[in-house]
Amino acid sequence: MAKNKRYSPKKDTTKKSKNKKKYKLRNWKEYNETLVNRGRIDVWVEKGILEQWYSKPTSKPGAQRKYTDKAVELTLQFGQVFHQKLRQAEGLVNSIFIMMGTKLDVPDHSTLSRRGETLTVELPKEHREIVTIIVDSSGLKVYGEGEWKVRKHGWSKHRTWSKIHLAVTPDGEIRAEKLTGNNISDEQVFPELLEQETAKIDKLAGDGAYDKSTVYDTCQKREIQIIAIPPQKNARIWQHGNSKLKFHPRDENLRAIRKKSRKTWKENIGYHVRSIGENVYFRWKTIFGDKLNARKTETQETEAAIKSSILNKMRILGMPDSYAVS
């Protein structure tokens, strides 16, 4: 006789799904065309790049570079857009050049790997006078076993992670990025992120991990007027009212929370714009995955920078315009 199975009542998700907002797109036709254009070859070949393919000889001693940084970056870019490793990226670009009738050599996989360690990648960004910045970080798997093995036998010492730190705008543009080890905290990278932004920052938003004196000192040096970082729940005033110093922005936030509520403060200061940063990470990992293919730290930094630059180019092609329907 079969044993009776233990009864386990199903969780009631009615309330959760009922309160969840639903969205529709205003520009579905245009956005659909944008998604199609992401796969077009001519989108990813910059105008005039073929004329700058080979490096000019220098008078310095030693072996001369055959390819420019733009040629190496373009080949690596094709590999990331179409999810190809170095050897396959070399073959892909070579096939494109044959179909174009272009008699140019393509950097081989060894060159791509070697040059990737020192390649400087510039983010394609719009020129802006004033920006609102959202900062956040997320983990990326570097190398290790698959999810099934981890589930079956657990983690091993070969499974490691890196952290990618991004500074983005409310419309989804990546203004700064930095890849670090998982032992580096968010506030340690924060000053370097802001150094990459040359425009004036009128507002900055981040989660509680940025509630550090280093972050506020950097913001005050940049004369940021609105700092939307929630203080810790057990936070205390840093500068009391009898101090001759100017009121600290963190203390002003803390006083506003105590006077009303944390929820009201978040609504008044516009803290919920921070969710845009999470959306950018969702797009980043949906398009490129949650892991890095490179093994060396330097090439991992280049890989992350190229992926961020690609995401900015995809944003230029077009973004969804959504609105809440319930």
Image (cartoon, rainbow, N blue to C red):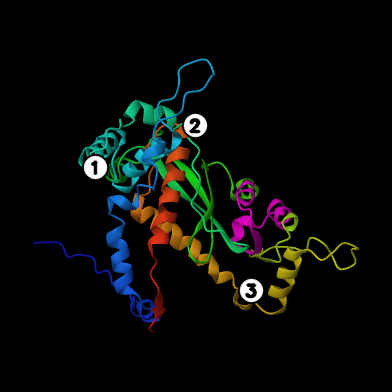
Q: Which mark is residue 118?
A: 2
Q: Distance of mark 2 from mark 3, alpha carbons? A: 41 Å
Q: Quadrant of residue 234?
A: bottom right
Q: Is residue 108 above or below residue 163?
A: above
Task: Tell me if residue 145 can be seen.
Answer: yes
Please name the residue that numbered disc 3 is placed on: 269
Give amino acid for label 1. Met
Q: State how far apart marks 1 and 2 are (Cα).
A: 30 Å
> Quadrant where the C terminus lies?
bottom left
The percent position of residue 6, horizontal first and vertical second, equals 23, 65
Does 130 sit above or below residue 76?
below
Element type at marker 3? helix
Foreground pick, 301 / 123: 123
- Which mark lies nearer to you, 1 or 2? 1
Disc 3 crowd, CA 10 A, few/some/many (<14, 14-19, 20+): some
Q: Quadrant of the N terminus?
A: bottom left
> Quick one: which residue is furthest to the bottom in this view?
326
> Residue at coordinates 66% horizontally, 58% vertically from top-left?
211
Residue 100: give its label: 1
Q: Nearer the viewer, mark 2 or mark 3?
A: 2
304 left or right, relative to 101: right
Q: Earlier in the sequence, mark 2 or mark 3?
A: 2
Q: Decide whether residue 215 is among the magenta residues.
A: yes
